Amino acid sequence: MTGTRAYLVRWLTALLVLTAAAVTALFSAYYGVSRNTTAVSERSTPAILQVAAAHDALEAADARAEASLKGHTTDVEGLGEDYRNELSTANQSLAQAVKSTTGGKAARQSLLTITGLVSSYSDLIQQAYVNRGNEDLRDAYRSYATTMLNRDHDGILARLDTVQNKQKRVLTEQTSFGWLLWFAWVVSLALFLILGVLLVHTQRSLRRRFRRLVNPWLAAATALLLAVLPLASFTYETQERLGTAGRVLDGDDIGSNGGEITDKVADTLRDTRWRAGAVGWIPLGGAVVAALILVGLQPRIDEYRFQPR
């Protein structure tokens, strides 16, 4: 093998390896952000809203129970339709929260425990109603129910808050541009810059050695590297929208406005779906760049196929 052929083979190998490394880094960096749009809209949003809805409904049910037990129409109306509706909403939300929680196995187990505690709470409220004629007994049952609901650390609402905090930590991870993503993007952009510089250097070297003004294949490969710029822009836009969605889900009164919040998150992330789909084009684009490099250099290598005698 002649010195020129060996040089070209080594250079081709280096360019192909660098291309593979750059594309792999870009794929990881882009996918790391784009995948979170689906996770936020399809997992975190319903999980957080269901727990918030259960929390708000239990607070409302407790207020309704308090008003009913001390009202003048309790004997006629019972605990009231409003109380039953709120309690039913809480139970339905808890059932959905068990299925959709993003807090892991511990959160799911906690929600199952909470479901049982809500049933016990409901029984205590019912006993308070049954004993409404005995003020002391009524108030005692009512006090037990209130304590079960509002007790610090292990009360129903406190347990719900613990689950919600776990879910919101997951949401923060999904909507934050952490150091790993920064590192992946810095590495990918650096590799693409180096690859572009080396491709330009390769074309200049070939022009000196083979007296040809331009290598169209290598020029096309170099131009294709510029696709990293719109991908970086897409990532920035996606990350901005993820941050907005996170702030929406961290707002007040999200439990009582679940439908509106869901629509806001959906509207915020809607335009990110097609950007997320661009991740599939990255390996294809990398394969095209590698093919263009190979087609651009292989004929020059073939010119030195045989060693002179």
Image (cartoon, helix red, strand yellow):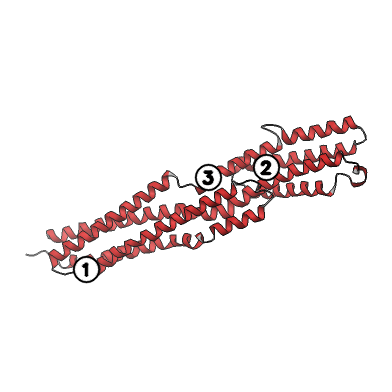
Q: Is residue 282 visible?
A: yes
Is 221 positioned to the left or the right of 164 in the image?
left
Is 51 positioned to the left or the right of 30 in the image?
right
Q: Callout 1, which amino acid?
A: Asn
Where's residue 230, x and y in %?
Answer: 39, 61
Q: Is residue 1 visible?
A: no
Which residue is rendered at x = 70% and y = 34% of the image? 155
Q: Callout 2, which amino acid?
A: Leu
Which residue is rendered at x = 87% and y = 38% of the image? 70
Q: Earlier in the sequence, mark 1 or mark 2?
A: 2
Where's residue 72, x and y in %?
Answer: 91, 41
Q: Earlier in the sequence, mark 3 or mark 2?
A: 2
Which residue is the site of mark 1?
Answer: 215
Is 136 positioned to the left or the right of 186 in the image?
right
Q: Earlier in the sequence, mark 3 or mark 1?
A: 3
Which residue is the site of mark 2?
Answer: 111
Which residue is the site of mark 3?
Answer: 172
Is 138 positioned to the left or the right of 260 in the image?
right
146 shown above or below 84: above
Q: Callout 3, which amino acid?
A: Thr
Instruction: Indicate the secondary structure of the residue bearing disc 3.
Output: helix
120 shown above or below 307: above
Where's residue 78, x and y in %?
Answer: 89, 45
